[in-house]
Amino acid sequence: MSANPNSEARGAVPAGAPAPPPASRTSARSYADAPRRPSRGRPVGIPPRASRTASSKPSGRAPGAAAAAVLAVAALAAGLAFPAPLAASGGELELDGAALSLLWAFPFAGMLLSIALFPLFAPGFWERHFGKVAAGWALAFLLPGMIWIGPAVTLYSALHTVIAEYVPFMVVLLALFTIAGGIRVTGSLAGTPLTNLGFLASGTVLASLMGTTGAAMLLVRPLLRALATRKHKVHSVIFFIFLVANAGGCLTPLGDPPLFLGFLKGVDFFWTLRQLWPQTLFLCGSLLAVHFAVDTFLYRREGGGKASGEPGAEAPGLEGKRNFILLLGVVGLVLWSGTAGGGRIAIWGDIEYGHANLARDLGLLALAGLSLATTPGSVRRGNGFTWGPIQEVAKLFGGIFLTMIPAISILRAGTAGALKPLVSLVTGPDGAPVDSAYFWLTGALSSFLDNAPTYLVFFNSAGGDAARLMHDLPGTLAAVSCGAVFMGANTYIGNAPNFMVRSIAEERGVKMPSFFGYMGWSVCVLIPLFVAITFLFFR
């Protein structure tokens, strides 16, 4: 840990007075010598927004702007009370998580509480101004960072996050959202327990083949159409998030970003299938069985055969089939970009964009444009397709990515940072890894933080040698992998598709539970299963 500059003499200061803010400490080396951070992969979703009407438009007085300004000023005042001064790692531009207090996670906590509480207590305000609130919390980190950490380090961290992590995240999500929105299942879909079980089971399998986001975007609209005349729908959407948007992606590196990062670190492509299928089968099989039992009970209470799908006679089939080819193109581009070499484009300092990544992002945007140009508008209208969910994701996750910077830096500091009491739990008194601790700590932090860097932190804590982990410590690597993937289902922000599914469902009239309401479902359904997985596989 770097020495605390507060211990250095800085001139005469009255007793009891706060120390003056330090000058910015940046690298004496060139920016190009600063270390690069691995980009986050994953990423996640946002709270839904009901269909707008004329009466829901913001007034000209823009009360949300004033509220965002108040939040920013309040956060700046809080920032002035943070421990100071702070330095970059070794005097470099990389933010030193070992020097950060947990108070720097305050903006991230505020962002999460805003997502959880505003829709409950001020839904109208949140509907119109959630983007301003997200911007306010982002400033809650950036402004104090400029003062206490230094403008160069803060700007570097923000630009790195936006360019190397947020932009690729949004491009992939936009492509999948657009292309999957051009595929429509036709026919009269009846939301019977067997039909719903078929959707969940097929989506769970597809999640490992085309990614959790791709599978979720492909099947959520057909599922909602099947549920159109059902009285009880929420449970099916929640289990869809549990299974398709999370647990189903545990069998291949294509399924979820943490596993893809493990593949890039040297984990064999088929290792996850060979080693994680028992845990995945247990969790997914249990969830499918629980959902079928609950859905059957509720279906009978509703009167049985009355749920006949959306009204109107329509031949069964698929519209927009060419979009399946485009979806395969998305998967192929993402896989290729992770394994291709090539040069890099320098943007600022050591912030670079690889040629392969640029080609991937341009290719993804081209595929999305091709889908828009070639898919008949009637297909998207039949799907109830709107741009509202992706706009919400872009705004809220912009705030989440920025406010998460100090929290991720503290986590990366490991036992040298403020989370030392937690991180140290993964090693026993004899120095051996504690698999159960790896599973729960990776999972608990992945429920709220980006699960890709969380996976990397604990992957490196276990030694970071893929060959050794696969052959000598397979249980530890399995615990880290399952924790990162499975427990992304614990909250709406645990994985990219979670909030997207919620937003699409709300636009289709499904009243989804609040942030804490959803966590109530995960505590009652998922946590007991995770406890069972611990005793069965990670003791």
Image: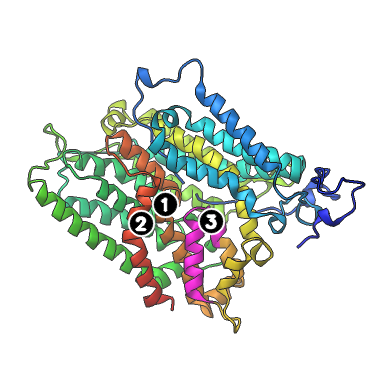
The residue sitting at 14% across, 44% down in the picture is 190
Residue 36 in the image, given as x and y percentages of width and height = 69, 53
Q: Is residue 438 magenta?
A: yes
The residue that label 2 is drawn on is 522
- Name the residue nearer the viewer: 438 or 226: 438
Amino acid at the residue labelled 2: Ser
The residue sitting at 22% across, 39% down in the picture is 225
Residue 240 in the image, given as x and y percentages of width and height = 30, 51
Pointers 2 and 3 in contact (C-beta within 8 Å) = no
- Name the residue nearer the viewer: 118 or 528: 118
Pointers 1 and 2 in contact (C-beta within 8 Å) = yes
The residue that label 1 is drawn on is 491
Sequence-wise, the earlier of marks 1 and 2 is 1
Left/right placement of residue 272 relative to residue 86 reads left
Quarter holding the N terminus is bottom right
Residue 11 in the image, given as x and y percentages of width and height = 92, 47
Residue 137 in the image, given as x and y percentages of width and height = 58, 38
